[in-house]
Amino acid sequence: MSRISHVAAAVRSSPRRLFIVAFALFFGTGLVWAITTPPFGAGDEPAHVVRAIAIVEHGDLHGDLHGEKHGNSPQSFERIVQVPAIYRDSGFRASCYAFLPNVTPACAPFAGSSKEVATPTYAVRHPPTYYAVVAALTAWADPLLGLDLMRAITAAICAALLASATVSLFEPLDSELAGAGMLLALTPMALYLSGVVNPNGPEIAAGIAVWVSGVRLATEGGPISGRLVTRLAIAASVFTLSRETSPFWLLLVALTLFALTTKPRLREIVRERSVRLWAGVVFGLTLLQTAWDVAVSPFGLADRRFAIAASTSEIIRGAIGQVVPNYRESIGTFGWFADPVPMPVILLWTAGLGTLIMAVFAFARRRDVLVVGVAAAIAIVGPTIADAVIARDAGFGWQGRYVLPFAAGIPIVAAYALRRSSRFDRTAARRLAITFGVVFAIGQIIAYAQQLRRYTVGRDGSLLFFARWDWSPPLPPWLLLGGYLVCIVGLAVLLTVPGGARDDDTEVVPAAEPTVT
């Protein structure tokens, strides 16, 4: 452990070195998922890719609502755009295995004509920023390479955001317990989404970066770091432009951070010129995103296939019944959201989160306990209300991943609350951090290995899937599994292993809090 601690300390001693190492590890995990997941094997990915291609190749931001131009009327929640037929046809083929867990992707080759055809997509109302970024750099490539590049760009965006959050964790203090909180926020679902074409991945990564940098800024005293403010502002800018609901989540995060800080610290923050400048930028981008939402109306689209005709009381009971499925999905449901992580992963994550929250209620300050409790309540009640509201138009359409940009803040805030509590022993904090690092590593590896098995031999196929397989990604399964293991263990070590003697003597300076005796 001593040698590992010295390596961790050496990496953390330089913000630039820490960013590079963290970026490499996070990008590695996203890239492994990008290579492992079959073309269009991720839920909603065909719709997102079609949206991106239509924007870059035709500047089509809105599509054709009624399909009159092309003689192909979409359903009420779709619009028609023009893209090469290979995207439409390959998306249809994915249904041969997407919801059949013991069927491999061998039945769905990514192939087809480059002739442009009318193609429906239900992502056409989504904000265009993410799609323009991932597709602008891939327009020159053939469709399969273009899809791979879109995934790689998504992984790079997420890795940069998470690496910046890692720098915020350890600059200038060692913060293993806070690092463990960040790892618990990074559920298998969050890492999986960083390797597929879906704006939810960057939204979650940006949300985590905002939480980490924001909590540091709001709760710790001393001079305000311009670099911390810049990291926070860039993450908030990406966050608010990611999806139609992002401004709402960003507002809730800002209110939570406001509740964590004190009046003297708030005055210090407001007086800082860089804060005011960046706040104006983020506010302006949020207004633009909100204007798009108002103009395009992406909410409440009717999908009568799943509409629920029932009394209000029945709908409320049904929405409450979605709490557990939504929670499980927020930890991990891969593929076309039909491949749940194994139950041991759910139990491991639940045990880790439960232990952290119980420790907060036992040792943290009253204000921190209240903030963590309210945030947890919002993460549970918010999706329940959303499900109840949309049930008569689209059924219980909320998915657990939608709340992750906000819910990821619960373990992050909880870890900081323990870190600055005078009643929580430093030795216990170190042990808890290492325990959470082990939970993270074991859970992530089990989740990935099972999904790799599902693709190569089927969910119930041979346990030797890494040696004999029916379908294989572009790289051998054993190589992908080994690469993922290295990245995950590297992240656990980087964020949770004590970084040397320096940490023993470092005290967290509260933001203008009264001295506790």
Image (cartoon, rainbow, N blue to C red):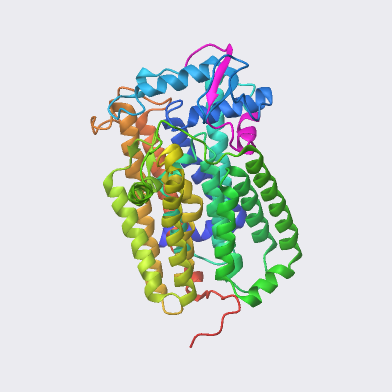
- Please state the horizontal and vertical placement of residue 141, each as a whole percent of the image: 60, 21
Instruction: Look at the image and say whether residue 118 sits in the magenta stretch.
Output: yes
Please identify the quadrant where the N terminus is shown: bottom left
Instruction: Look at the image and say whether residue 10 sits in the magenta stretch.
Output: no
- Please state the horizontal and vertical placement of residue 130, each as a whole percent of the image: 61, 37
Residue at 51 percent across and 70 percent down: it is: 502
- Name the outermost residue toward the bottom: 517
When asked about the image quadrant of residue 69, the answer is top right
Left/right placement of residue 85 relative to residue 292 reads left
When asked about the image quadrant of residue 435, the answer is bottom left
Up/down of 88 relative to 302, above or below: above
Which is nearer the eye, 407 or 510? 407
Up/down of 228 relative to 507, above or below: above
Is residue 108 shown to the viewer in this render?
Answer: yes
- Please state the horizontal and vertical placement of residue 514, each as a whole percent of the image: 56, 84
- All told, the count of numbered labels is 0
- Please state the horizontal and vertical placement of residue 445, each as a whole percent of the image: 35, 44
Residue at 71 percent across and 62 percent down: it is: 275
When asked about the image quadrant of residue 220, the answer is bottom right
Is residue 411 shown to the viewer in this render?
Answer: no
Which is nearer the eye, 469 or 385? 385
For the record, the magenta segment spans 111-136
Left/right placement of residue 41 relative to residue 234 reads left
Which is nearer the eye, 101 or 75? 75
Residue at 73 percent across and 67 percent down: it is: 272
- Name the outermost residue toward the front: 311
Which is nearer the eye, 298 or 268? 298
